[in-house]
Amino acid sequence: MDIAVSLPQNGYTVTVRRGVLSEAGKLFDLDRRVLVVTDDGVPPVYAETVAAQCKAPTVVTLPQGEATKSLPYYAKLLHVLLENHFTRTDCVVAVGGGVVGDLAGFAAASFLRGVDFYNIPTTVLSQVDSSIGGKVAIDFDGIKNCVGAFYQPRAVLIDPQVLETLPRRQVANGLAEAVKMALTFDASLFALFETEDPTAYMEEIIARSLQIKADVVMQDEKESGLRRVLNFGHTVGHGIEAAGMQALYHGECVALGMLPMCSAAVRARLLPVLEKLGLPTACHVSAEAAWAALTHDKKLSGDTLTAIFCETVGSFEMRKMPLAALKETVFGLLEG
């Protein structure tokens, strides 16, 4: 299936199909210099399959993990682009998860003020969420995604077949983002997570999550209003993630971050879903450290922050909250 992301400028198509990885050369313009960026957690055959369809490929394999989304590795990609004489008519292709997509996308956005960028996500998290919408960034000084840009891809290919190599924990990590979409926008999608085996509906979950994300992005590309809802669970989750919980994946932190932002009734339904998926429902992190990281949130405006709450499944509420009030909510989670 194809999902259109129609924007005033730079709209694109997301193609979702099993085996589509082998069609990259037909669906992307690869008849030029192509920087293929991947990491060592991705089976090499995926990047090799893409490179074989390029006229002049250069493949860079980075270390797996959030630490790679940093200035040194961003600089490494820029050096490779310069050393291989890339021009504005060339392109960058990300083959990997959210870290690879964010880093490669930011390099594409900034090199020569922008070269074409294509994304081939290979994790559940990147397939259901981060591969579309145009947010590209690196972490800096311990703060997630604080250096970046809005830079839309030219096209996105999603091959559900590549998920078959992922360990169960990585699958659950990505499904946390789909749970976020369901809680805030689609009660019937959330019902799939309440079935005995939600992974039996994986391709439907991917497609429906992507459609929700696309619909939101088309209404609010630069996150001035509605798109803030997609940060549900991230305000607290990023605080936990930045506070030294390197043992937890991003989606696991988002799962924790959703809990204090739900009503008691929603939380009663969410907890068994998280437990069934193998996602955490409690953490042991310094509340003060998490709060310090949270105060760097990009959604801050003066001493208030727009926080997203879920009072009933399939709906959301945006509340502008003084930081002091939000602090009580955060400390209640982390100390409770």
Image: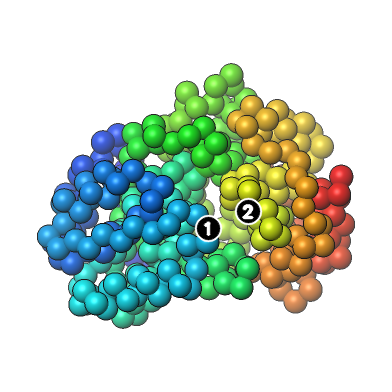
Q: Amino acid at mark 2?
A: Gln
Pick the quarter of the image with the N terminus.
top left
* Element assignment for label 2: loop
241 left or right, relative to 100: right
Q: Residue 307, position in %: x, y?
A: 72, 58
Pick the quarter of the image with the C terminus.
top right
Q: Residue 200, position in %: x, y?
A: 47, 23
Disc 1 marks which residue?
A: 66
Is 185 above or below relative to 243? above
Does residue 49 appear in this view? yes
Q: Assess whether mark 1 and mark 2 are in contact (beta carbons under 8 angstroms).
A: yes
Residue appearing at x 40%, y 75% in the figure: 75
Spatial separation of the CA atoms under disc 2 and disc 1: 9 Å
Residue appearing at x 87%, y 57% in the figure: 328
Decide which of 9, 296 is in the foreground and name it: 296
Q: Amino acid at mark 1?
A: Glu
Q: Residue 276, position in %: x, y?
A: 64, 27
Tally the numbered discs: 2
Disc 2 marks which residue?
A: 246
Residue appearing at x 38%, y 51% in the figure: 40
Residue appearing at x 62%, y 68% in the figure: 143
* Element assignment for label 1: helix
